[in-house]
Amino acid sequence: MQDNKLIKSLVIDAQLGNNSAFEQLYKITIEQIYALTYRLTGQSFHAETITKKTYVNAWQNISKKNEFTPIASWLKKIAVEMILKDEKDLKPAKESAEDIHFYSNTLEKHFRNLDFRNRLIYVLHDMEKFSLEEISKLIGISEDETKTILVSTREHLINLIKE
């Protein structure tokens, strides 16, 4: 989905150094970015950390944002890159009340138990609508391998849900 006129205007203002314009973009997009980082990292502590890093990186690089890329898509890509960069450091943290509540949902519990790469591919493709090509480039594997993992992850989730 393309950005509307207000968001395009806020992006331009932020690119010119307007802090309040960037703050408005933050308020408009924070829920989407946090939901993505939470689903991919599996814990609120890590999601909060990655989300903060995402917005710091975005602020530092807003001048480089392509005008044709929607702001949410651009931020999601940054968030995924931050997660991939920190993946090995994402050790289990103490579960918060938010984590316990979120994972009381059976489907979310199944997502959490997926191998990280499988969860990443499934969430990015089926929930966030990234193309196979985009995902392949982000994680450094072929499109065919990405598609194979996606199909097997879908089958695995379907089998878990049937149980």
Image: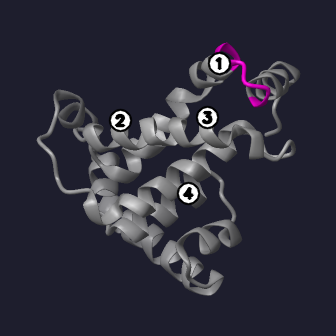
Please tell me the numbered disc located at residue 19: 1
Please tell me the numbered disc located at residue 9: none
Q: CA distance from mark 1 to mark 3?
A: 9 Å
Q: Are marks 1 and 3 in contact (CB under 8 Å)?
A: no
Q: How many marks?
A: 4
| Spot occupied by residue 44 in the image (x, y as percentages of width and height) | 28, 37
Please tell me the numbered disc located at residue 48: 2
Circle 3 packing at 10 Å, graded few (<14), some (14-19), many (20+), is some
* Residue beneath the point at 86% across and 42% down: 67
Q: Look at the image and say whether residue 101 sits in the magenta stretch.
A: no
Please tell me the numbered disc located at residue 59: 3
Quarter of the rendering containing residue 85: bottom left
Q: CA distance from mark 4 to mark 1?
A: 30 Å
* Mark 1: secondary structure: helix
Q: Judge whether 40 appears above or below 17 on screen.
A: below
Residue type for callout 1: Asn
Q: Are marks 4 and 2 in contact (CB under 8 Å)?
A: no
Residue type for callout 2: Glu
As drawn, the residue found furthest toward the top would be 20
Quarter of the rendering containing residue 48: top left
Image quadrant in which the C terminus is located: bottom left
Residue sitting nearer the eye, 84 or 147: 84
Q: Look at the image and say whether residue 19 sits in the magenta stretch.
A: yes
* Residue beneath the point at 47% across and 68% down: 154
Earlier residue among tags 2 and 3: 2
- In magenta, the rendered stretch is 15-21
Please tell me the numbered disc located at residue 124: 4
Q: Are marks 4 and 1 in contact (CB under 8 Å)?
A: no
Q: Which colour assignment does the render follow?
A: one colour
Image quadrant in which the N terminus is located: top right
